[in-house]
Image (cartoon, rainbow, N blue to C red):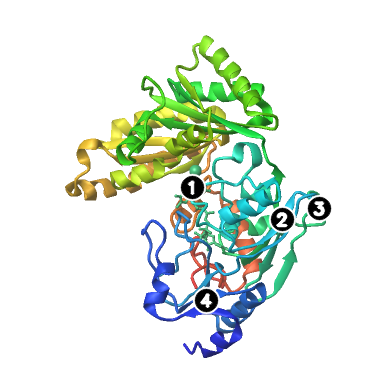
């Protein structure tokens, strides 16, 4: 295809050489690789619109990409080489911060860390926080409705977004950057684009919610016997600490042992091991002493009730960071151990303990040679119910056998989730990884409504084809393009 007209149509970069394109065509985990006619990196919203008009006129599919840290293959084109990869990374300006309104407007390619820093410079908190924050972008966070470790208190990306600016597949710009907490003027288009994984249009900027910066943050690392005890402690913590409880993460001892094995210097902060641990965080508007007092009182009562064992409470920023590192390094440690099979599931919090007990038992009965690596945002009902090879099956000769377990394990875990009213993708989206499974668990009515939205907003099916929804029945927006 002649790309000279495209090159002339916008300001920014256009990568045509295979070597220049390569970093954009494989996902962060190296699980998916695709091809593209080119990689475009426009400079402004107007440039994005010009690129989309060019694509629309020629029926060229578009795959939007932010920081390329998504875990579901949504930002990688297919192998046909027909699509244009549209990187938003050069739309990286903070347009405005309005401290009094508790809002800021940033462009889609601003990284999450840049957005957090811009808020902090204005004396405010932008609370979205996840381990990929140095690379992932606000556009990608919104397109995949990212979660992370502070959802319990502040909500996920959707709840942190007041308005967005979008370029439609036809190349029109919708300025929906209203920084309002209340706006009941018809269908909520913003919420359609959030979580749409690039399948409806391109998010080019967003108005985000800001919060007061806490005066102090304290973390507690707590030993307990079971997920049931963790859920009980969560109820007590919410009652005692109210909105100052900003994170409540669960992890098994297997997770911590993996971090200790793969990260030099990592160490359990407790005298004795326990089957499970909780990392709770308190963000206090008054002082560190006030936060510590509140968390000590909570844990004192829980110990007396026989609910929890030993606990460590941070007394410095270094200790606070060290406790958090034990939680945040689990994913990387699991990858360092060998192949992984991951499940990002959500359940009603009241059903988590019973789900873990029943699913652990079913896996032990039906699958040999695997190890469960279970952790997650238990305060949000979101578990990363992951699987690694057993310690004696780490050699290359066992890899094939482990990979063959993926489909039956997925089925077992996701059936158990569906049976309890849960979700098979809590925060990582569907992309291509969970696209077909999600269609399996959704009702025909829900799928029909989703397809109707897709057809209405992207009638030619050019936006990120065959992501999120399976290539559907005949029709331009079925995704088969
Ligand atoms: P990309 O990977 O580039 O894209 C993700 C999807 O959004 C794709 O479908 C893409 O087409 C679409 N997209 C990207 N930008 C736009 C745009 N401007 N307009 C329209 N569509 C767009 N996720 C969590 O939710 N919680 C976590 O705790 C978490 N931890 C992680 C830890 C690590 C180490 C890693 C690698 C990932 C983690 N993730 C987590 C997943 C990932 O970081 C998030 O999904 C993130 O929001 C993706 O942002 P991105 O800019 O990298 O998007
Ligand atoms: Zn997570």
Q: Residues within 10 Å of mark 3 (few under 14, many from 20)?
A: few
User: Left of 134 or right of it: where is 368?
Assistant: left
For disc 4, the marked residue is 40
Q: Are marks 4 and 1 in contact (CB under 8 Å)?
A: no
Above or below 73: residue 289: above
User: Left of 197 or right of it: where is 155?
Assistant: right
User: Left of 69 or right of it: where is 91?
Assistant: right
For disc 2, the marked residue is 104
For disc 3, the marked residue is 183
| Label 4 to label 3: alpha-carbon separation | 35 Å
Q: Residue at x 43, y 32 (%)?
A: 251
- Frontmost of labels 3 and 2 is 2
The mark that comes first in sequence, 4 or 1, is 4
Tag 4 secondary structure: strand
| Residue at the extreme left | 397
| Residue at the extreme top | 304
The mark that comes first in sequence, 4 or 3, is 4
- Frontmost of labels 1 and 3 is 1
Mark 1, ligand 1, within 8 Å: the answer is yes
Q: Residues within 10 Å of mark 1 (few under 14, many from 20)?
A: some
The numbered mark at residue 131 is 1
| Label 2 to label 4: alpha-carbon separation | 27 Å
The answer to whether residue 433 is seen in the rendering is yes
- Frontmost of labels 4 and 3 is 4
Above or below 372: residue 49: below
The mark that comes first in sequence, 2 or 4, is 4
């Amino acid at each position: 295809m002649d790309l000279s007209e495209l090159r002339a149509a916008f300001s920014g970069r256009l990568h045509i050489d295979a070597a220049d394109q390569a970093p954009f065509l494989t996902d962060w985990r190296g699980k998916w690789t695709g091809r593209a006619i080119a990689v475009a990196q426009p400079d402004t919203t107007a440039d994005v619109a010009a690129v989309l008009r060019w694509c629309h006129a020629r029926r060229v599919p578009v795959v939007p990409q932010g920081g390329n840290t998504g875990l579901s293959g949504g930002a990688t084109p297919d192998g046909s080489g027909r699509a244009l990869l549209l990187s938003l990374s050069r739309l990286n300006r903070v347009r405005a911060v309005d401290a009094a309104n508790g809002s800021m407007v940033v462009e889609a390619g601003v990284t999450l860390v840049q957005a957090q820093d811009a808020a902090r410079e204005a004396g405010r908190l932008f609370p979205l926080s996840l381990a990929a924050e140095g690379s992932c972008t606000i556009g990608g966070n919104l397109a995949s409705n990212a979660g992370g470790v502070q959802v319990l208190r502040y909500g996920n990306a959707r709840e942190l977004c007041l308005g967005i600016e979008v370029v439609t597949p036809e190349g029109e710009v919708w300025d929906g950057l209203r920084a309002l907490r209340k706006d009941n003027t018809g269908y909520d288009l913003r919420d359609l684009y959030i979580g749409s994984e690039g399948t409806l249009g391109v998010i080019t900027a967003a108005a985000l919610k800001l919060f007061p910066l806490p005066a102090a943050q304290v973390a507690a690392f707590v030993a307990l016997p079971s997920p049931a005890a963790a859920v009980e402690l969560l109820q007590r913590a919410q009652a005692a600490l109210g909105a100052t409880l900003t994170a409540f993460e669960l992890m098994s001892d297997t997770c911590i042992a993996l971090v200790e094995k793969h990260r030099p210097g990592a160490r359990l902060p407790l005298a004795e091991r326990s089957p499970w641990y909780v990392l709770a965080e308190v963000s206090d508007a008054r002082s560190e002493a006030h936060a510590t007092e509140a968390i000590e009182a909570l844990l004192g009562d829980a110990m007396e009730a026989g609910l929890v064992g030993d606990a460590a409470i941070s007394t410095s920023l270094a200790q606070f960071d060290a406790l958090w590192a034990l939680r945040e390094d689990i994913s990387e440690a699991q990858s360092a151990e060998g192949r992984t099979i991951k499940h990002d599931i959500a359940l009603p919090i009241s059903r988590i303990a019973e789900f873990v007990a029943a699913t652990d038992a079913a896996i032990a009965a039906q699958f040999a040679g695997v190890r469960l690596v279970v952790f997650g945002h238990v305060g949000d009902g979101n578990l990363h119910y992951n699987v690694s090879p057993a310690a004696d099956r780490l050699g290359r000769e066992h890899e094939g056998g482990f990979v063959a377990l993926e489909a039956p394990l997925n089925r077992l875990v996701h059936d158990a989730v569906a049976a309890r009213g849960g979700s098979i993708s809590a925060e990582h989206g569907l992309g291509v990884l969970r696209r077909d499974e999600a269609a399996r668990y959704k009702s025909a009515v829900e799928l029909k409504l989703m397809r109707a939205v897709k057809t209405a907003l992207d009638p030619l099916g050019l936006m990120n084809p065959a992501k999120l929804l399976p290539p559907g029945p005949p029709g331009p927006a079925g995704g088969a393009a």
